[in-house]
Amino acid sequence: QVQLQESGPGLVKPSQTLSLTCTVSGVSTTTASYAFSWIRQRPGKGLEWMGIIARDGSTFYTPSLKTRTSISRDTSKNQFFLTLTSVTPEDTAVYYCATQSSWPGLSFPRGMDFWGKGSLVTVPS
């Protein structure tokens, strides 16, 4: 059974960097046809796809967040990471990691086969 679990601080000060970890079990982050995404949902908003890392380590980001977002991984720990710089209160959200088994080609949100439970990150005003 594939499982994903987000972890990281629940409070980040404005202008600082948000860092989250997704620990994956049941599938390797280097498995062919799999890719791993970060997604967020801000209060009162819909799901927002942020970026993805593929089995070869290549990354792709949504244009609106590209300059502030970085996704990386540690294959030895089967984890992947989100870094979001220069946060503001607008970055307050529940952050999810998720995986799709149909890469290449982004399949959001319906094609996301497995999701973590989400991690609330608050950036105070």
Image (spheres, rainbow, N blue to C red):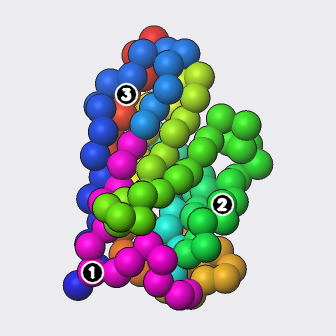
- Name which residue type carries label 2: Thr
Asked if 124 appears above or below 22 in the picture, the reply is above
Name the residue beneath numbered marker 1. Answer: 26
> Would you place residue 47 above or below residue 7 in this image?
below
Q: Pick the residue in front: 109 or 75.
A: 75
Quadrant of the frame with the N terminus: bottom left
Tell me how far mark 2 sits from mark 1, CA to CA.
22 Å
Residue 97 picture location, percent across and down? 41, 59
Relative depth, front residue between 36 and 124:
36
- Identify the residue position indicated by label 3 in the image: 122
Secondary element at image label 1: loop
Quadrant showing the C terminus: top left
Q: Please report the bounds of the magenta region as a residue range.
A: 20-33
- What is the number of the mark on residue 59? 2
Residue farthest to the left? 1
Look at label 3 and name its amino acid. Thr
Disc 1 marks which amino acid? Gly
The numbered mark, 2 or 1, whose residue comes first in the sequence reads: 1
**3 or 1: mark nearer the eye:** 1
